[in-house]
Amino acid sequence: LEDILPTSVISVAVSMLTSVLSGSKPAVRVSALRILNRVKANVTASFHELDALVSDSNLSVATLAISMLLKTGAESSIETHLKTLTNFMLDISDEFKCNVADGIKGLCFKYPRKKTVLLSFLAKSLRDDGQYEYKSKVVDTMMQIMQELPETKDETLLHLCEFIEDCEYTDLACRILYTLGEEGPSTKGAHKYIRYIFNRIILENPAVRCAAVQSLAKYGRNCPSLHGRVCLLLKRCFGDSHAVVRDSALLQYKILQNSELNNYTDGQLGVPVENLVQTLKNYLGDGTSTPFDINTVPKKVKQQPKKQDQKTSASAASPAVTATYTSYAEQLAKVPELTELGRVISSSKLLPLTESETEYTVGCIKHMFAEHIVLQFDCNNTLEDQLLENVSVKVEIEDGEFEVVDEIPLESLPYDTIGTTYVIIQKEPESNPVGTLSCTLKFTAKEIDTASGDVDENGYEDEYQLEEIEITIADYMAAWTCPNPQGLWEELGVANQNVEKYALNTFKTLEQACKEIATFLNMTPCGQTNYQPGVSSKAKHLLFLSGKFLGDTQVIARSRMKLNPSGGVAMELTVRSQNSDVNVALCNAL
C-alpha cells in the first residue's frame, strides 16, 4: 500500500503508530515497531520515543527499537547504538539476532565509512553463543558486505579466519574455506591466510581438511610467490590418517607441478561428469595415440545403468515411484542447462503419474527456483523387448501464468532402467502462480530381439498420456521444523496473521485431519503438537505447523480442531508470517 497511497496518508499512519509506542501493552508496542520497521517513509519524528524504548524491559520491544534506530539513525550515533545493543545480544533469540544482522548490513551500505566498526560488531557476535542458523546468517551478511564493498575484503577475510579457529559447524567452516580460496589469492597480503587454512588441516575433521587442502592449492596456482610454500605444505598432508584427504592433497600437488592442468581445475568443464568418465574409458579402450579432446564429450545427460540393488527392489514396487535422492541440488547441478537457474528453493515429493503396473512408469518431482519451475520426470521402461530413445515429456499449460521455455530429453532408456528428463517452466519473478499442467510422454520405440539382443534401427514414434500435474501454493513451501514455535508465534503477532474457518466433513478423526492438513500445506508439525494416538484427545486438538515459503519466509500456522458429533471436523486455521499475501494464499488453499 505504501507504493500506491499518497505521502500524506502514509505520514498520518506513521504518526499514529508513533503515538502508540508509549502505550502500556507490550504487544501493541511490538506490533507498532514491526510495522514502522517495514515502512520506507521518514520516521525521524519518533527518534525520542525509540531512544526510550531501547531500555524497555521487554526484550522484543528493545530489540526492534534498536533495529529501527540502526536502519534510520544518523551516522554519528552508530557507535552508541551498537554499544547499547551489545548489552542484551546474549539474551535475545536467534530470530531477533538475524534481524539485527540485516540492519547492520543496510547500515554498512548506507554509511561505508563505518564499515570497520560494523564488521567488528558482526565478527564479535560470531564468537557469542548461537545456533547454526544465526551463525550462518552472520557469515552470509559479512560475505555480502565484502561483495558490495570490495575495500572490506582483507578485513572481512581476517574476521572469518578468526571465526573458523573455533567454528563447531563443518558446513560453515567449509564455506569459509572455499571463500578464502576464491577471494584470498587476489588480495595484497594473501600469504597471511595460509596459516589459518593450514591450521584446519592439522586440527579439523576429514571434511574440513579436504576443503582446506583445496583452498590451499588455489593459493599455489594463483600466487606464484607462494607456489613453493604451498607445495611443501601439501606434501605434509601425504601422511594424513584419512584416505580422501591424502588423495586430495596428492592430486592438488600434482596439478601444481603441471601448470597445464590449471585450466581444468578452477573452471567449469561444461559437460556432465558421467559423460566425461564414459568418454575417457572409451578413449583409453581404443588405444589411440590421438590427444584426448574434451569437445568430443556429449553435453546431454546420458542414462546410467541401474544398480543391482535397485533391480532387486523393482519386483516389489515401481522404481519410478520409490526412487529417492539424497540431494536434489547435487543431481540438478550435473545438468548444464539448469546451472544458470540459480539455487533450488524447494523440491516436492515424487508424484506418480502412472499406475505401477503399466508398461512405462513415470513420476514427477517439482523443483522451485526464483524465476523458474523445473519438472523432473523419472521414467522407467518395463518392456524387455523395447528400447526407448529421444524420451521427453510434452507439457501443456491448461491454466496458470506459466510458460514452457525448454525441454531436456533423455537420449536412451533401456529396459528396466530409471532415466530422467526435464522440463523448464518460467514464471514471473516474485510471483507464486498456481495451475494445472497436462503431460504426455513422447519417445521413439525400437524393437529388440530378446534372444540375440539386436536392436531394430527402424523405430517408430509413440506417445503415452500421463496424469495431470497440479502446481499449488504448497509447492513453494520448504520443509522446516521451527525450534521455538511459541516464540515465533508471539514474535509475528496478530498484525501478521490471517484467519479462516472450515467445515471438513470428509475427515472422520482428528488424527486423519492433522496428517492431511500438514501434507496439503507441505508444512511440518512442530512443538510436539502432532497428534499422538492414545495420548491426544479424540474430541479436540491444537496443532502447530511450520515451513519456509520460497526458502526464506518463516511461516507458522495454528490449527484448532474439534470433532463434530454429527461427523466431520470443524477447524480454525491461523497463518502468521511477514508476508500477508502468503498468509491469505495458504488459508485460501484449503
Image (cartoon, helix red, strand yellow):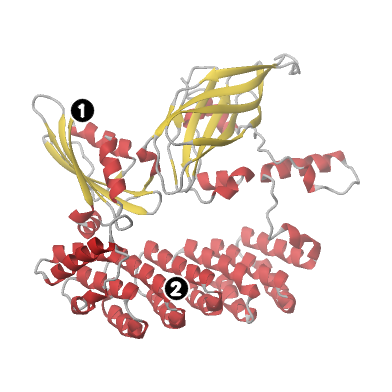
Say above or below: 90 vs 320. below
User: Which residue is depicted at the point 71% across and 77% down?
Assistant: 226
Q: Is residue 216 visible?
A: yes
Please say if 551 is above or below 475: below
The Cα atoms of the two marked residues, 2 and 1, are separated by: 53 Å
Q: Which mark is residue 109?
A: 2
Residue at the disc numbered 1:
507
Residue 261, compared with residue 119, is above or below; it is: above
Dot 2: few (<14), some (14–19), or many (≥20) neighbours within 10 Å? some
> In the image, 226: left or right of 473?
right
Quarter-of-image position of residue 137: bottom left
Residue located at (71% from left, 61% from top): 251
Foreground of the two, 501 or 160:
501
Secondary structure state at the residue bearing disc 1: loop
Q: Is residue 61 left or right of residue 105?
A: left
Eyeballing the image, is 515 above or below 382?
A: below
Residue 146, horizontal then vertical, whole percent: 52, 72
